[in-house]
Image (cartoon, rainbow, N blue to C red):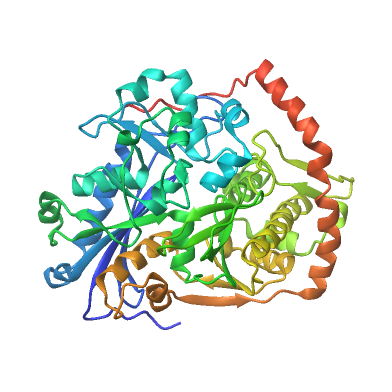
Amino acid sequence: MSEKKHLTDGPLVLALDSSTTSTKAIVVDAAGNVWYTAKENIQLHTPAMDYYEHNPIRWWETSRAVLAQVTSQLSPAERERVAAIGLTHQRETFAPFDKNGQPLRNGILWLDGRATEQIRRYGNDHIHELSGKPAGVTPGIYKMAWVKEHEPEIFQNAYKVMDVHGYIAWQLTGKPVSSQAAADSLGLFDIQKRDWAPELLEIAGVKREQMPELVIPSHEMGTLKRELAEEWGIKPVPIIAGLGDGQAAGIGAAAVTPDVGFLNLGTAVNAGVESPIYKYDKVFRTHVSGIPDNYVFEVLQSSGSYLAGWFRETLGDPKLLGEPDPALDEAAAKIPPGCEGLVTLPYWNAVQSPYWDSVARGAVVGWRGTHSRAHMYRSILESIGFEMRFNLDSLERGTGTKITSLRAMGGGTRSKLWRQIMADTTALPITICLEDEISALGAAVLAMASTGVYGDNDVANAARHMAQYGETIEPDMDKHEQYRDVAKVQRTLYPKLKDTFESLYELAQKYPSTRPKSPAAKL
């Protein structure tokens, strides 16, 4: 593959992605070439079982650091070309702040599972229809209700309660502002109005004036503070309203029509399609798109590459410390589809799509003495594919359009075995996106669209100009037919084990875990 050439003229944009484990920044030109990248890690704190938190100060500290790093690599003439800054973030995560932007407690993350009682008390079909979000672990509304009930003084004393994107935008512009396509993930919107819903704010325990001002995605939220512009050697450029990292990955892949889906094989596995109309469904969740006036129908499977990594770390070669194991992949590739009767329910981190059950657990069924570690590893990978095919069927029903191909990103695409299994189980060709920082690229697309460099401000048009692709994996339809038979068996597991999961949840409440806590975050 020939080396990418940087465009010698035209605008450059900076894009920031603050995620669960780190914050990344990139410099991008109008052809989608990523010039420079920088990354700073964020420590994940687990003060109790199923509690996941960040020190929110790190969202800004890491953002400031990586933006400084990438701009420092530009020449003075190149810095003059920087025309805008785009943002994306880990969705559903929030924190409360005082008037000076100082956090009043740790941020509570999207994967935090403390709010099971609140999910059961408040979650219902009306809230799903209003917000687009099925009741489950991820929406911020239920964890905000937990804070309201267990730490009432926090929201009583808060000046603002911000999503990650909003807090970073506040630090960049001086205004507590966020994007419709970022703040929406908290689950507090009347999504069709793209505005805060009073009845959902009441459940969460916050007032409208405590929430950020909302801006249409790809529109300007404000300009970069002059002191930051001087620090980085650029002009006080517009800060562009961005979007959640899932929607951003789809736009970075130019999956901008209902017949082309994005597939993110990351820590979690999620997939989605664009839609010009609003619908809600028990299987998928609906987000505000980064394309103004559009929606994204998205399915979420919380155990993705996390689960493959868990297997390698817990049951794999101890010398590799959970890193990819070529020998394990080679052995698993020799196992026939269906793993000779071993099937897995991949709900190690509960289940989102299609059941949205916060107390569901993983299961491996069908063990025989002839099964090996390679069988279990392959069975895990297959199960993620089975779940994805089932969930994609729901997306197709939602849009009324058959999905013809998937564009894939995330660390899981590096596994030849897993990407072939995903193609075979879904019966769809999968094209690999070249850019590793695909969510940051999606934020860059919105920022680049705002410059008008392509003759308009159309986000979908900008995405088509900037997306870059590698190999396409074609499905083996003979194996797909075999997988369909296995999937029918695998799909019976959850209904049969649902009551057992409920009993295990009750046991866990009665006999709490003694799992060691992580170091407390200092605010």
The one of 467 and 156 positioned closer to us in this rendering: 156
Residue reaching furthest to the top: 510
Left or right: where 267 falls relative to 76: right
Residue 107 at x, y percent in the picture: 39, 33
Is residue 321 visible to the viewer in this orientation of the structure? Answer: no
Q: Quadrant of residue 445?
A: bottom left
Left or right: where 60 falls relative to 363: left
Question: How many numbered discs, if any?
Answer: 0
Residue 235 at x, y percent in the picture: 13, 62
Residue 274 at x, y percent in the picture: 52, 65
Left or right: where 495 falls relative to 20: right
Tell me: residue 210, above or below residue 190: above
Residue 431 at x, y percent in the picture: 57, 73
Tell me: residue 297, above or below residue 251: above
Q: Quadrant of the C terminus?
A: top left
The one of 508 and 205 positioned closer to us in this rendering: 205
The one of 58 and 168 positioned closer to us in this rendering: 168
Left or right: where 275 falls relative to 523: right
Q: Residue at x 36, y 44 (%)?
A: 164
The one of 68 and 485 positioned closer to us in this rendering: 485
Is residue 236 visible to the viewer in this orientation of the structure? Answer: yes
Q: Residue at x 70, y 36 (%)?
A: 360
Tell me: residue 354, above or below residue 251: above
Q: Quadrant of residue 260?
A: bottom right
Residue reaching furthest to the bottom: 2
